[in-house]
Amino acid sequence: MNSKSHIAKEFGVHRNTISNRLGNVSFMAKPAPLKKLPNELVLVLDGTGISPDEMLILSYEYLSDQPLAWLFDTHETFNSWFTLLKEIKKRYSVHAIVSDGQKGLIKAIKLSFPNAIHQRCLAHIIRLSFALLTRNPKTEAGVELRLMIRMLGKVRNDFEAKVWKDGFENWNKQYEQFLKEKSFNPENGRKWYTHKKLRAVRSLVKNAIGDMFWYVNDSKIPNTTNVVEGGINSPLAELLHRHRGIGKQLKEQLVLYYLYARRKTKKTTRSCA
């Protein structure tokens, strides 16, 4: 789909002229049927902003490589995810779900598909941990933890998963007292944990570790949400940017146009971790 700038250049008018005219246009994206689905689905769930006040809440079926179901909402919340998953539950059986572990999403998954495997996205854990630890941690504990997080993406089998989990447990025991250290402000009496970012990474991993390695024994399950982030969200963001300035209703139709078109194609995405 050509951008408004391209169309304006082709017809020799200003881009704003095209924007004004498109603002009065209404069209409906033509629905595309789903490709054949497996008996039990593997869902990759992710939300992405399509404007400052609107989110696309998306469920992607990994095995058949296609967008399955979606809705628009102002925020990514428990209610939005529960609404979407409730509709999916009416029609399909789900084997596994891959997500970034957003709190409302975790709750919605537990209520909707309590028996489904929930694989946590390793890419999110790695990126968030690196952001907290920085490139050059100032403590020995931080250096060791960053190295462990870096190795997380290389875990490929049960043995390597056990080695990684044992390593994290040993790290936690070794630095347990260190992570309890507190700083003190004598002027106001305020206390806080000195190593807050290290504690944050520890909490992130401890909360996720039970669901981090399902993929090593099940080749149907990806260990990241990259198929959505790289294969759907990134090109969709580019498309919306090229057609920026259109109204909310037309923007939603553009998103639907893209999702239905994506059902008809197969695009490879780079696996992250």
Image (tube, grey):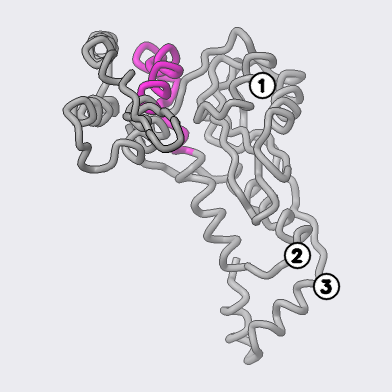
Drawn side of residue 186 relative to residue 2, left or right: left
Q: Are marks 1 and 3 in contact (CB under 8 Å)?
A: no
**Comes first in the chain, label 2 or label 1:** 1
- Judged by depth in the image, the label closer to the viewer, 1 or 3, is 1
Drawn side of residue 158 relative to residue 82, left or right: left
The residue indicated by pointer 3 is 24
Disc 1 to disc 3, C-alpha distance: 38 Å
Residue furthest to the left in view is: 140
Q: Mark 2 packing: few (<14 Cα in 10 Å), some, or many (20+)?
A: few
Q: Nearer the viewer, residue 265 or 244?
A: 244
Which span of residues is magenta-colored?
200-227
Location of residue 215 by image quarter: top left
Element assignment for label 2: loop
* Residue 23, percent from left and from top: 78, 72
Location of residue 24 by image quarter: bottom right
Q: Amino acid at mark 2?
A: Gly
Element assignment for label 1: helix
- Give me the disc on residue 108: 1
**Comes first in the chain, label 3 or label 2:** 3
The residue indicated by pointer 2 is 247
Q: Amino acid at mark 3?
A: Asn
* Residue occupying image coordinates x 69% and y 50%: 54
Q: Is residue 121 above or below residue 210?
A: below
* Residue occupying image coordinates x 37% and y 16%: 213
- Judged by depth in the image, the label closer to the viewer, 3 or 2, is 2
Drawn side of residue 37 relative to residue 147, left or right: right
Element assignment for label 3: loop
Q: Nearer the viewer, residue 194 or 191?
A: 191
